[in-house]
Amino acid sequence: MYISEQLLNPSEQRLRLSTQLGVEHVVLDNRGTELVSAASGGVSAWDATKLREYRRWVEGFGLAIDVFALDVGAILLDSLVDLHSAKKSRDLLARNIAVAADAGITCLKYNVQMVGITRTGLKAGRGGCSNSGFRLAEYSPEADRQHSYWGVGYPTHQDEGDSQSALLCGQKQARDVPQVSPQAGWDAIEFLVDGLIPAADAAGVRLACHPHDPAYPPGGLNGIEHVVGSADGIRRFLALSGSPNHGLNFCQGTVAEMFKEPGRAMIPVIEEFAATGRIFMVHFRNIRGGYLDFQEVFPDEGDVDMFEAIKAYQRGGYRGPLCPDHVPVSKLDEGRERFMAFALGYTRGLLQAAGVWSTPRHRPTEPLIHQQETNR
């Protein structure tokens, strides 16, 4: 295992900072840029040459791309209401998997959220920062609009419920979509998996799926079911295909949100899923609280013992990246670079304490110049 950093369309300066923090591996999401997205958002064809140049630009900083985001757009909802359009998007996604392989990218992550990553508000955190959270008893459409995440799920100080943000990531607010029963939810996910796994197998690319965040109550929320919002749901998802390329972006915080007592439940669950060999990357984050009532906190102050979590991943045989994720927000750290740096250092310290450590490899002193610099 090793630290990795998940970054959104990073600039040269941001990549330099990552290397100065000791990062050697990154997980990148470039949705919303012409590198991977159509001007109107959603699924578009990738260009192998541009993607290869971008990978080489990142590698010029001494960084390896572990995982790259595959934007599935609104394909899950489309498969329920506009199957023809969904099939066209699925074919395009399958071609993009082949393009990624041609560009030297071997793992892609995707999200099966049909609606935004639902949150209901901010709670006071240590030192005056704010913790994003979900409390079912406080749910309202306005809270959903103001506090839910879009895209990869990094909260910011902007209103993320605007139509453009939703368009770019193919997600909508729950009240804006038709009802999705458990059967419809599984039908949509199976439609996607059935179309993408053969392409992944042919290209030798692993596909890492992020579970539903958060777990919804029995009967769903606003008629929307989160079928991959429980440990059993994750098990069923993995059972959809026996391919070694069908796996998880195992978000430790999201899985913790599925349990009333995550401090007790998570260690055996981590070991169980690590032992499947199907975890391709980990969002290494912590929460306070649990099922239907939680806050996202700094990794050292949540209910899950993060050192025991490291040891559980070890016992399960996991050897991949640990990415900090969903740290609190503060006006004192608008870009949350310092908060992420704290989480990276904390994670590296845990890895050292657990005896998991590798000598940093040599990095070039000057990065390559990327031809598409104007896009960042």
Image (cartoon, grey):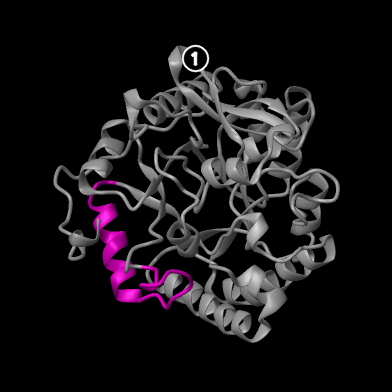
Q: Which residues are magenta?
A: 36-62
Q: Is residue 241 above or below residue 61?
A: below
Q: Nearer the viewer, residue 98 or 72?
A: 72
Q: Nearer the viewer, residue 313 or 41?
A: 41
Q: Hey, which quadrant is residue 54 in on the image?
A: bottom left
Can residue 91 be seen here? Answer: yes
- Callout 1: SS: helix
Q: Is residue 308 magenta?
A: no
**Percent x, y for residue 117?**
60, 47
Residue drawn where x is 48% and y is 28% of the image: 328
Q: Is residue 51 magenta?
A: yes
Q: Quadrant of the C terminus?
A: bottom left
Q: Which kind of residue does numbered mark 1 sit on?
A: Arg
Q: How many marks?
A: 1
Q: Residue furthest top?
A: 127
Residues packed near mark 1 inside 10 Å, few (<14), some (14 to 19) or many (20 plus): few
Residue identified by numbered label 1: 126
**Percent x, y for residue 75?**
60, 72
Q: Is residue 359 above or below residue 247?
A: above
**Percent x, y for residue 296?**
57, 29
Residue drawn where x is 57% and y is 33% of the image: 121
Residue drawn where x is 26% and y is 66% of the image: 53
Residue drawn where x is 58% and y is 61% of the image: 207
Can residue 114 be seen here? Answer: no
Q: Is residue 156 left or right of residue 334?
A: right
Q: Hey, which quadrant is residue 6 in on the image?
A: top left
**Percent x, y for residue 319?**
56, 42
